[in-house]
Amino acid sequence: MYNFDELAKRRNTYSYKWDVKDNELPMWVADMDFKCLPEISEAIKKRLEINAFGYSYTPEEYYEAFISFWKRRHNVEYKRDEMVFSTGVVPSLSSAVRALSNVDDGVIIFTPVYNIFFNSIRNNKRRIIECPLIYKDNRYEIDYELFSKYAKDNKNTLLIFCNPGNPVGRIWTRDEMERVAKIAYDNNVIIVSDEIHADIVRSDLSYIPFYSLSDIAKNNSLSLISATKCFNMAGVQASLALSANKDILKKFDRDLNTSECAEGNFFCFEATIAALNNGDNWLNELNLYIDNNFKYLEDYLNKFLPKLKLTKREATYLAWVNISAYSNDSLKFRDFIREKTGLFVSDGVEYGKSGEGFIRINLATSLSNVKDGLLRLSNGIKIWEEIN
């Protein structure tokens, strides 16, 4: 048994999330507050004992750990010669955009979606093609008709696909992804599948790797996977990219090396190997704990804040909440709540135009923090109602 009520102390540690004002409660960026799996810490301590932190190459054990883990937990057979190391999913996104599309090409994204997708497209002088998901009964679905329309435009050459969906919390079904794969293949659109949230899923569900769908899918895609999100070690900076299409992999790998994002740091390999080889039980208990946090949130909203609507959650630890009963200006609402109560959440509009009227709340924290955050949210809304 692991104690997820006992959190790491991260204030004044150069933490991107926690270096905020003393009275503030950060529940925004997708960074967990839980202590890491003990085997990760032990692996890093052992590495420290060398006491010389020089260059490292990627050991075969690193690839083997990924192959074994994904086979064990997701029943997919990844192959060693279809994998390349990268320092992270985010640099991989930008490398993929540069390698697999041309300047001024359109890159399709299903919005609302992870905000860095926009940066990876815009910063590399490609055009953002938002294909909004269909929001119905507090759940999101893919608009295949609109996607097909965009895919048929030969100026749109790439789709960045978030599987599972952040912030919408979807585990895409096999049928849904096969339809996406078919439309993309028929129209020469390559798919980049960001699967970093793969193992943060509702305990009664499981995600399906895009690569595992069919020969069409695995030969027309680049999948990005990592242990850093689910094991709370984003600062370790290590990931993998994989494709059965040698041409796609070669182009991606060339750009990755040109960008100098193909070499790991001194600690990342041992940390990742330890996590993947020893972390199954930790992950199972983590998902149960997060499930409980979501249950508390759902019950609280139903009882005390019924105007807020929680999107049905299948994956991630990120609650996507419809605040449109109070405001469609999610940025203004977020800033107001933070100023009045110290609760720091994410505004929805940074995930695309269709994110207006939503906020994102990170529930990968202790239940006591969830309770504190919801009390702050209630108090902030009371003040909001008095003013508005």
Image (cartoon, helix red, strand yellow):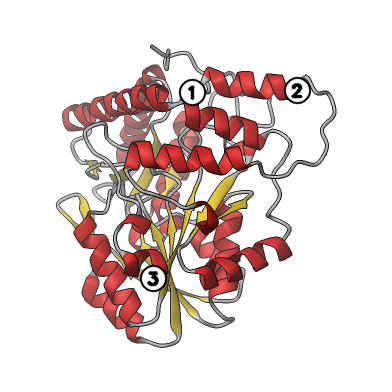
Mark-to-mark CA distance, 3 and 1: 34 Å
Residue, far bottom: 154
Labels 3 and 1: the sequence-earlier one: 1
Labels 3 and 2: the sequence-earlier one: 2
From the top left corner, tell me how far across and down residue 269 is, in percent: 64, 36
Mark-to-mark CA distance, 3 and 2: 46 Å
Helix, strand or loop at label 2? It is helix
Q: Nearer the viewer, mark 3 or mark 1?
A: 1
Q: At x 42% / y 17%, what residue is drawn?
A: 4
Locate the N terminus by quadrant: top left
Q: Nearer the viewer, mark 2 or mark 1?
A: 2
Q: Circle 3 sits on which residue? A: 130
Q: Circle 1 sits on which residue? A: 34
Asked whether 382 or 386 is in front, the reply is 382
Q: Image quadrant of residue 61?
A: top right
Identify residue type, mark 1: Phe
Q: Circle 2 sits on which residue? A: 48
Locate the C terminus by quadrant: top left
Label 2 packing within 10 angstroms: few (<14), some (14-19), many (20+): few
Q: Image quadrant of residue 303?
A: top left
From the top left corner, tell me how far across and down residue 110 is, in percent: 35, 64
Q: Determine if residue 111 is in view.
A: yes
From what the image shows, is residue 245 above or below residue 112? below
From what the image shows, is residue 24 above or below residue 355? above
Identify residue type, mark 2: Leu
Q: At x 39% / y 38%, what residue is drawn?
A: 361
Left or right of 69: which side holds 145?
left
Label 1 packing within 10 angstroms: few (<14), some (14-19), many (20+): some
